[in-house]
Image (spheres, rainbow, N blue to C red):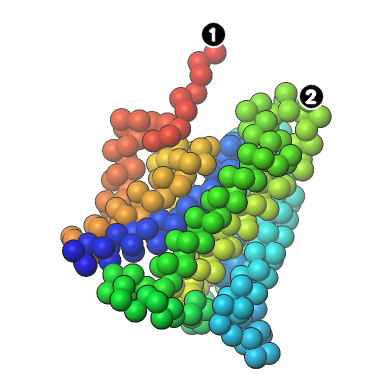
């Protein structure tokens, strides 16, 4: 039973990180129907920013949870500014271009950011400090759940609640929903669509940075390529749940994380990707719009 619980919480931890990333994919797709392939690199930049910030703050004598919160906050601000800049440089000039143009631009931006970090940092794996402290009250649960698992899952739940409140009850959140439903009507109603798109990229980048900081502290090492694999898995989770659907992205991420964890634990870690993508294929065969996605309406 303990082994099952260990795999279960490991799956929830993976799924939580995928969820933080998948939300960025699904929000951007819901607003401008673009698959932002550079989103994984924003996650990677958040992790590297937290590493640099934590190293400087540690020299100043800051430690414990304060170090995690401050380094994370700096990473969120820095990664959000990158997300905003990428949107302005790579996507906004192509707003009225054929759909293939921004897609190619996204792939190019992803490769550019990877190589930028490779040249600015290193091609090797770099050790990441353990920013998440040990909790004494978890002593009896360590056989199946680590403190970092608890922090990652709890943080993800808090982020989901805050994002839901932000989208449902704030003025900009309502503008985002209106733009998602009909961009032209939203513009005619006075919604500043450019501002909505920028806020969407900033919000998605902030969530990706939080995920990057937490998983880096959990794993203990990073390199310039971590965003590509994580981004691919998060995109898979968004498609699995129904791209464009925020609850679907979270559900897809948790299913994907648990599938990988149980496949690695009970069969072999060599086949965890096979099971994850096999599940995606099966669901898309029987439900092409994803678990919670809406079928596109047919115009007569």
Q: Quadrant of the C terminus?
A: top right
Badge 1, how many Cα within 10 Å: few under 14, some, many 20+? Answer: few
Asked if one can make out residue 103 in the rendered structure from this viewpoint, the answer is no
Q: Against 14, is 217 above or below?
A: below
| Tag 2 secondary structure | helix
| Label 1, label 2: how far apart the Cα atoms are | 24 Å
Residue visible at 52% across and 78% down in the picture? 131
Residue at mark 2: 188
Residue visible at 65% across and 52% down in the picture? 203
Q: Against 71, is 15 above or below?
A: above
Badge 2, how many Cα within 10 Å: few under 14, some, many 20+? Answer: few
Residue visible at 49% across and 72% down in the picture? 216
The residue positioned farthest toward the top in the image shown: 300
| Tag 1 secondary structure | loop
Estimate the x, y position of residue 113 in percent, counting from the top left: 61, 63
The residue positioned farthest toward the front in the image shown: 137
Dividing the picture into quarters, in which one does residue 45 lie?
bottom right
Residue visible at 43% across and 72% down in the picture? 148
Estimate the x, y position of residue 92 in percent, counting from the top left: 73, 43
Residue at mark 1: 300
* 1 or 2: tag closer to the N-terminus: 2
Q: Against 66, is 183 above or below?
A: above
Position of 139 with respect to 110 (left or right) is left
């Amino acid at each position: 039973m303990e082994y099952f619980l260990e795999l279960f919480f490991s799956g929830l931890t993976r799924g939580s990180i995928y969820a933080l990333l998948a939300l960025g994919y699904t929000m951007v797709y819901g607003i401008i129907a673009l698959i932002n392939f550079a989103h994984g690199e924003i996650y990677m930049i958040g992790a590297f920013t937290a590493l640099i910030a934590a190293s400087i703050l540690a020299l100043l004598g800051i430690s414990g949870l304060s170090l995690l919160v401050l380094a994370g906050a700096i990473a969120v601000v820095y990664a959000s500014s990158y997300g905003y800049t990428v949107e302005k440089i790579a996507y906004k000039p192509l707003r009225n271009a054929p759909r293939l143009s921004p897609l190619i631009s996204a792939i190019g931006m992803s490769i550019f950011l990877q190589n930028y970090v490779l040249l600015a940092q290193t091609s090797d794996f770099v050790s990441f400090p353990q920013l998440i402290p040990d909790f004494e009250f978890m002593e009896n649960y360590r056989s199946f759940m680590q403190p970092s698992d608890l922090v990652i899952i709890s943080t993800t739940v808090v982020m989901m609640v805050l994002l839901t409140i932000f989208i449902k009850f704030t003025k900009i959140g309502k503008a985002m929903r209106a733009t998602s439903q009909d961009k032209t009507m939203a513009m005619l109603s006075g919604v500043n669509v450019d501002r909505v798109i920028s806020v969407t990229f900033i919000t998605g980048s902030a969530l990706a940075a939080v995920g990057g900081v937490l998983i880096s502290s959990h794993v203990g090492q990073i390199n310039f390529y971590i965003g590509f694999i994580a981004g691919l898995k998060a995109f898979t989770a968004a498609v699995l749940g129904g791209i464009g659907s925020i609850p679907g992205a979270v559900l897809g991420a948790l299913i994907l994380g648990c599938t990988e964890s149980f496949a690695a634990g009970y069969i072999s870690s060599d086949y965890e990707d096979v099971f994850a993508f096999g599940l995606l294929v099966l669901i898309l065969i029987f439900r092409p719009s994803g678990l919670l996605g809406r079928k596109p309406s047919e115009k007569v």
